[in-house]
Amino acid sequence: MKSFNYKNIEAFVFRLWAREVSGEKMSEKEEEVLKSWKGHAEKDLDGVHMQEVRERVLAELEHYFASSPTIGHRKNFQNRVYRIAAVIILLLTVGGLFTYNTFIKPDIYLATLENRIVHLEDGSVVTLLPGAELTVEKSFPAASRLVSLKGDALFSVAKSKTHPFIVQADGFSTKVLGTVFKISQSGRKKAVDLYEGKVAVSSAGVPVSYLKPNQKWTNFGVAHTAAVISFTSDKASGKQLPELLALSFNDVPLKEVITVLEGNYNTKIHYPKEAEDRKITADFTGGTVSENIESLAFILGFEVQMKDNAYILKK
């Protein structure tokens, strides 16, 4: 039966049920197949639920038959209607399960202990890193090629000028038309590394970031934060040197803003303890370390001093 298409399976099972209801003799193999399908249909339904459904279907069916059967035939009438009701229930249940599993239920791909390569219908290739999970709707590919990702994965997206490819991750999404990029998700820290093409990264509360090759979007593990970092190769050492191109905060506590600035500017910033929970909204695009810290001080209404290669913010 696995080789049958959907319509053949539906017709075949319906025919078996019709023969069972009519009392027609069935072979042992046919009875076995029918029993298997019934078991599949009812395995997730409890007895109380099935009884309630049968009673509701019976009530709907009774007015289609003789309204006043004789007392002697009343029992046979009810048995016949119950059998018809059971067939309808099974048809709806199995048909619904089959339709859901075949045409509606998303495809889910898991990578357990090693990488898993997933080839999508549009020609895109996704390499799931261990622990990652990719969900692809049955409608894929549609006007927008939408997938969902948990964990880390490398995407090589087939090019299309009219059908954007969108990856929905944990709290952010990446939109492309055709490119190669990597999404990383470790706890609160999220990142997108771009190798080819262009991507747009959206995250709640901060401006959309547009990346070029050898650039990275990250939130540094802080909510409502977005940064774009560019990497260039050092000719002498061959190492990738990072440069912070843009940094945005939207309603972020000062203590978390300071942690991000210290980590990226490789400096120390002192500030009044009582101000650590003040919410900061700022866009540090361009500018030197000193200029951006001066901007932060202006937002706070503080002054800035330098001492022992550290910045001191004070009222």
Image: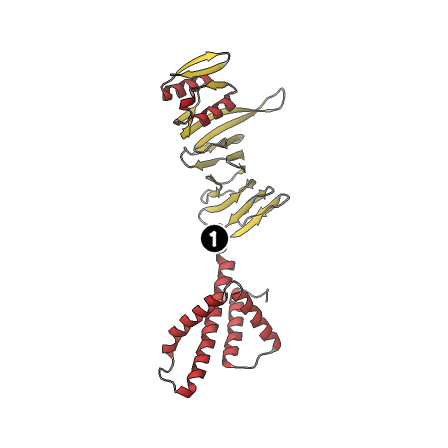
Please report the residue visible at 44 percent of the width from the left and 78 percent of the height from the top.
81
Across and down, in percent, residue 158 comes to: 53, 43
Q: Residue at x 46, y 70 (%)?
A: 51
Q: Secondary structure at mark 1?
A: loop
- 125 or 275: which is nearer to us? 275
x, y (%) of residue 72?
A: 42, 88
Q: Residue furthest top?
A: 307
Q: Is residue 140 above or below residue 309?
A: below
Frontmost residue, 7 versus 89: 89
* Residue 182 occupies quadrant: top right
* Residue marked by disc 1: 139
Q: Residues within 10 Å of mark 1 (few under 14, many from 20)?
A: few
Left or right of 172? Residue 298 is left
Which kind of residue does numbered mark 1 sit on?
Ser
Q: Is residue 161 left or right of residue 2?
A: left
Q: Is residue 97 left or right of residue 30?
A: left
Question: In the figure, 101 relative to 195: above or below?
Answer: below
Relative image position of residue 279 (x, y in whole percent): 39, 28
Q: Residue at x 56, y 49 (%)?
A: 109
Left or right: where 260 falls relative to 69: right
Q: Residue furthest front?
A: 274
Name the colouring of the figure.
secondary structure
- Image quarter for residue 240? top right
Q: Residue at x 48, y 66 (%)?
A: 93
Nearer the observer, 170 or 233: 170
Report x, y in % for residue 238: 62, 23
Frontmost residue, 41 versus 206? 41
Rendered position, 151 above or below 106: above
Q: Which quarter of the figure is the C terminus placed in?
A: top left
**How many circles with numbers are drawn on the protein?**
1
Position of the N terminus by quadrant: bottom right
